Image: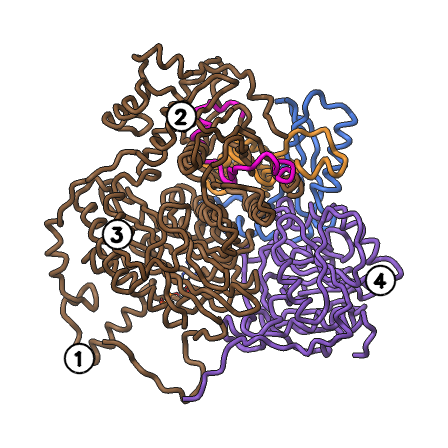
Chain colours: A orange, B blue, C brown, D purple
Amino acid sequence: MPRIVVDVMPKPEILDPQGKAIVGALPRLGFTSFSSVRQGKRFELTVDGEVTEDILAQAREAAETLLSNPVIEDVVNVEVVEA
Amino acid sequence: MPRIVVDVMPKPEILDPQGKAIVGALPRLGFTSFSSVRQGKRFELTVDGEVTEDILAQAREAAETLLSNPVIEDVVNVEVVEA
Amino acid sequence: MTTSAETVGKKFNIDTVENAAKTPDTELPWAELGLKQNEFDEVVKVLGRRPTGAELAMYSVMWSEHCSYKSSKNHLRQFGEKVTDEMKKDMLVGIGENAGVTNLGDGWAVTFKIESHNSPSFVEPYQGAATGIGGIVRDIISMGARPVAVMDPLRFGAIDHPDTARVMHGAVAGIGGYGNSLGLPNIGGEMVFDSVYQGNPLVNALAVGVMRHEDIRLANASGKGNKVVLFGARTGGDGIGGASVLASESFDDTKPSKRPAVQVGDPFAEKVLIECCLELFKGSLVEGIQDLGAAGISCATSELASNGDGGMEVELTSCLLRDPTLTPGEILMSESQERMMAVVTPENVAAFEAVMDKWAVEYSWLGEVTDTGRLIITWDGEVIVDVDPRTVAHDGPVYDRPYARPEWQDSVQADAFTGSVQDAGRPSAPAELAAAVTELISSPNMCDKSWITNQYDRYVGGNTAMAMPDDAGVVRVDEETGLGVALATDANGRYTYLDPYHGAQLALAEAYRNVATSGAVPMAVSDCLNFGSPEDPDVMWQLAEAIRGLSDACMVLGIPVTGGNVSLYNQTGTTPIHPSPVVAVLGKFDDVARRTPSGWREDGQAIYLLGT
Amino acid sequence: MTELPLIGEAIAVAAEPRLAGARIGVVTFPGTLDDRDAARAVRLAGATPVELWHADTALGDVDAVVIPGGFSYGDYLRAGAIARFAPLMAKIIDAANSDAKLPVLGICNGFQILTESHLLPGSMIKNDHLKFMCRDQVLRVENSNTAWTLDYEAGQEITVPLKNQDGQYIADEKTLDALEAEGRVVFRYVGFNPNGSRRDIAGISNSAGNVVGLMPHPEHAVEVGYGPESLDGIGGSDTDGLGFFTSVLNKIVGGAK
Ligand SMILES: Nc1ncnc2c1ncn2[C@@H]1O[C@H](COP(=O)(O)OP(=O)(O)O)[C@@H](O)[C@H]1O
């Protein structure tokens, strides 16, 4: 069944405490090549049947209204993935 | 600066309470085309300079050891994104 | 880590003091920054020249209603005037510091304060409420105390309004999310639904902390040559608000990045900051300390300097930034959370750094205390601020706003009791009484509060002796002796609307009773005065009356106000909220084992109704 | 009028002198909250608490270790995920797996750290209702042979506070079956499953029984006046959690049960 992937990230200007904690932990584990980390969310919406333009539009709207908080997050990606 | 994106999803056989809550909320908002939703994590690791094979390997290892817990999660994607 | 290389050499149209003196006629965005013409003129008069961009930023935030109390100051004086020596005998630190301090005996002291985070909690309920807890807890730490508990008086819109769930679920989750992560038990609060709070919820937060007398710290910078350090989170563009007018400071083509409209809290950073500060206090490593809240570095530097005996010099490019595009004015105004500023003697610098390193807290040495009486801030060596810190921190404008009893007050008071909306009469027959009681107890405001309180940790610390569902929260201070404190908060916006003078007194009386019935001796008061716009004479009258009522009642009860907060402009459009003075009373137990929980305990006990 | 009975008058635990020499380490990570509570519990049980710091590279001279609750590293990423890599954790893992079988108790966040460290199987995800929940929880002690439950009877019901957001215990069916078969389900929720945990599991042990993890907080039920009964008056007792700490002490000093 096809899925629609929605990626949501904290807005760049907003503090991301989770990313901050991860970037602090990485060097302790020997991973020294990353200068910053941000943590966002990935949603996979399963569609029964075909992904029509209308369904994709629904996913985009759900991404903006329910899946992300526009005050602090951006929807960075909405795409169809065939399973 | 280039970024490496790491996507982590709950294992398919594991109940995802957040995804379940979302799939319950969608129809109430008029989004009726999605039969299931799963919520995972998206990490963006910023690399200072070029993404070498070695750095990509580091990212893969960090994804498996720190960014995901193999008991409950799968790393579904590690890829380079140019900014 | 002491400097932030990326900020050095950044190209800004640096408006130096020298430049300001030479270009008196430069247009400045003082109105956009919220200053009135007379206030701007006053700044020019104080400085003897036009302010630089950075100075303008400082004066505008420090002279705001929020930081200067310009509309309420004249009235608040009553809290300091209507006190007897007897009332002051246990007051170790009074109004004016970050929080008042009360003597508990046995070498123990307690500090508590209540503050509002109303409008941020409407915009983004989770983060707004969370950072409200964060802010009040930092106030308590900055007194030298270990925070030991929090409380959260809340007011939301009508329970059946579609937006109420968004605000309420977010705010409660935010208070829990932040407070629980700090390891502070939540020992009580309030929850009221009323449509007057629909577009303007009240999210007040109280924190209480305890310390040994010798650990009391004040916000002042004294001792020439002592170092000034900023530590905790990096400074970002938070709280400067949307498209900042200060962007005009920016000179290069790369536009400054967008400034976030809301702040995101990092409770983990704050928890680490608490432990780190306590370790500093234990080692006597700081001379003075100040939390960074509203007005950020502007407030911290000017308050520390003006409370000290000299001056201060600060190099702003040393400040660690989260966003390298910030201009000097923006850095001075930023309200990024989880930051503290301290004054450290040169001998203690190494020990200070060791504590920071232990807790992995970032810090930057910004400058030092001087004996010039001036607050001087440089950017890469160039002077961008040169002011008398008192003029920024203390000598701001004070207004005698006109006020008068509203014309509608009589008609509001004339309204008869109604058992229900339909029934204008006073119920008398048993059936009517039954119906009125049923209606009363089915009010959402009488509901079980455990949906809220179950989201809060009341056990952490192991010293909570009473919490939900009791009328007062009780925490033990000393495990050996059982010495402890009780706290209750109360407010009734409807009573206060009907009669602000008595309404405020009733709030105090209720909190006082809640503390007294727990078995504690009431000792001190803190208040959060949530009102509408002071520019509305009706509202100003409510505020003046409430303060008069509260201060009179404190005299009668013999307990002093040790601190508090005024939150004005709580309104939707031009409709103000009901005047809502939230009053917190703190009481003392010699031994918390003597507390009395509410509720029937055993069969066969007699029931008495006391009072009138 | 008769003097009212006082609530929470200091309980004089009959502290046995033979226990005082036992040293129980309590680990603090950045973000740990219940370390002082755990140390108090150790003290009330009669032993000497020893502060351990996450960055230490030696375990020192301790007879057992408690990894207390809280939000190490803010619970960011996953609860326990970052703490698991602390230098001290490597020592604890070695000591727990060594022949000496150091007793280790993980409470709440400590349990999450133990699963992230693979000292215990399975993992914790968000509560099924997605909210933080603080309540007085009834537990059944299913196994009274672990280092931390010797002083309870199998089947005994105890009430201790529970408070967490990520408390839903999950593992695959095979692991769950194995845990049950080997008697490694040490505690089960009774009456109400507060987070959706599989098979009502509240706590488990490793196969040797020296490592135990659970979500509820026994260290918040060790003192009259400050436990579930006093705070909520729902019944049970204020000191049901004390047995965890006396159990390990009796084991350490070799006393009979
Ligand atoms: N927002 C809140 N936060 C914490 N505790 C609360 C909150 N609201 C209510 N409570 C607690 O719930 C209990 C019952 O509250 P309430 O119904 O207002 O009490 P009462 O009606 O007896 O004054 C009290 O212990 C109170 O402190």
Q: Is residue A23 magenta?
A: no
Q: Which residues are magenta?
A: C324-353
Amino acid type at mark 3:
Glu
Please name the residue that numbered disc 4 is placed on.
Answer: D101
Left or right position of C108 against D94: left
Q: Of the residues tagged 4 and 1, which is closer to the observer?
A: 4
Is residue A2 visible in the rendered image? The answer is no
**SS class of the residue under badge 1?**
loop
Q: Residue C81: give its label.
A: 3
Amino acid type at mark 4:
Lys
Q: Position of residue C317 (x, y in %)?
A: 53, 23
User: Does ligand 1 reach within 8 Å of label 3's beta carbon?
Assistant: no
Q: Position of residue C443 (x, y in %)?
A: 31, 65
Circle 2 marks a residue in which chain?
C
Mark 4–mark 1 distance (CA, rounded to whole Å) = 75 Å
Foreground residue, B16 or C267?
C267
Q: Of the residues tagged 3 and 2, which is closer to the observer?
A: 3
Left or right position of C159 against A67: left
User: Does ligand 1 reach within 8 Å of label 4's beta carbon?
Assistant: no
Mark 2–mark 4 distance (CA, rounded to whole Å) = 61 Å
Same chain, marks 4 and 3?
A: no
Left or right position of C209 against C41: right
Q: Residues within 10 Å of mark 2 (few under 14, many from 20)?
A: some
Q: Quadrant of residue A38?
A: top right
Please name the residue that numbered disc 1 is placed on.
Answer: C429
Point 21% across, 66% down: residue: C420
User: Does ligand 1 reach within 8 Å of label 1's beta carbon?
Assistant: no
Amino acid type at mark 2:
Ser
Amino acid type at mark 1:
Ala
Q: Quadrant of the C terminus of chain D?
A: bottom right
Q: Position of residue C526 (x, y in %)?
A: 36, 55
Q: Is residue C134 above or below residue C247?
A: below
